Amino acid sequence: MSERSLTARVPTTEDRDTVTAELCEHFAAGHLELEVLEARLAAVDEATSTVELSKLVSDLPVLAGPRSAPVEPPAAQGWALALMGGSSRKGVWVPPRQLNAVAVMGGVELDFRDARLGPGETRVNAVALMGGIEIIVPPGLPVTVRGLGILGAVDQVEQAAVEISTEAPRLKVTALACMGGVEIKTRPSETSEKSR
């Protein structure tokens, strides 16, 4: 065993964020139950060394696309994490094909009104644990929602597709709210409102 592997160091914020993202990815892949995820996320904050952090993911299977492989293009997948804080995506931005939003005792805002959505389906996996996720969409954008609320609520308001083309942008939201909430709201774009 190398000297480096024997030496534990105090984890940085980046170390904790990396392990948190990996745990959430395992939850989305069905490798972790909700209560196990909650316990491990709490342990991430309490970890005093990088060795303790590593143990939180060492027993989990290898995710598709190992970390040693080339990183996927930014447009393939992305994260919006709020751990006892807030995270926001708004204005003119290009969402990834799959966006994983996780709010743990915090809040995430995803505003798609001026977003540049690619053709076809954009997926949002929203997990709110004692937190909230607000998703704002423009009128006319086809939206489908699948959600489960456990001592929480998922606002499942959907918008029917205006176009039937498979290339037309559309949004699919899969949501889990545990003692929290996921809400989808329809509002006109601030840009279009100002141009009137």
Image (cartoon, rainbow, N blue to C red):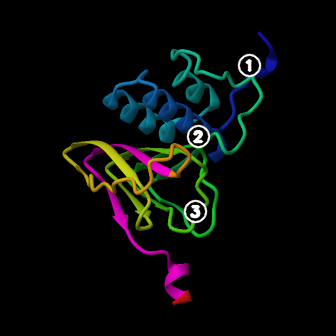
**Label 1 vs label 3: CA separation?**
43 Å
Q: Residue at x 51, y 32 (%)?
A: 25
* Res 18 quadrant in image: top right
Q: Is residue 99 visible?
A: no
C-beta proximity under 8 Å, tags 1 and 3: no
| Label 1: element kind | helix
Q: Main secondary structure of the magenta part?
A: strand
Query: What residue is shown with label 3?
Result: 115
Q: Is residue 89 visible?
A: yes
Magenta residue span: 170-194
Query: What residue is shown with label 2?
Result: 16
**Identity of the amino acid at label 1?**
Ser
In the rendered image, the quadrant that contains the N terminus is top right
Q: Residue at x 31, y 54 (%)?
A: 158
Compared with residue 148, is residue 163 higher up or lower down, i.e. above or below? below
Q: Residue at x 51, y 90 (%)?
A: 196
**Label 1 vs label 2: CA separation?**
18 Å
**Label 3 vs label 2: CA separation?**
29 Å
| Label 2: element kind | helix
Which disc, if any, is residue 5? 1
Mark 1 vs mark 3: in front: 3
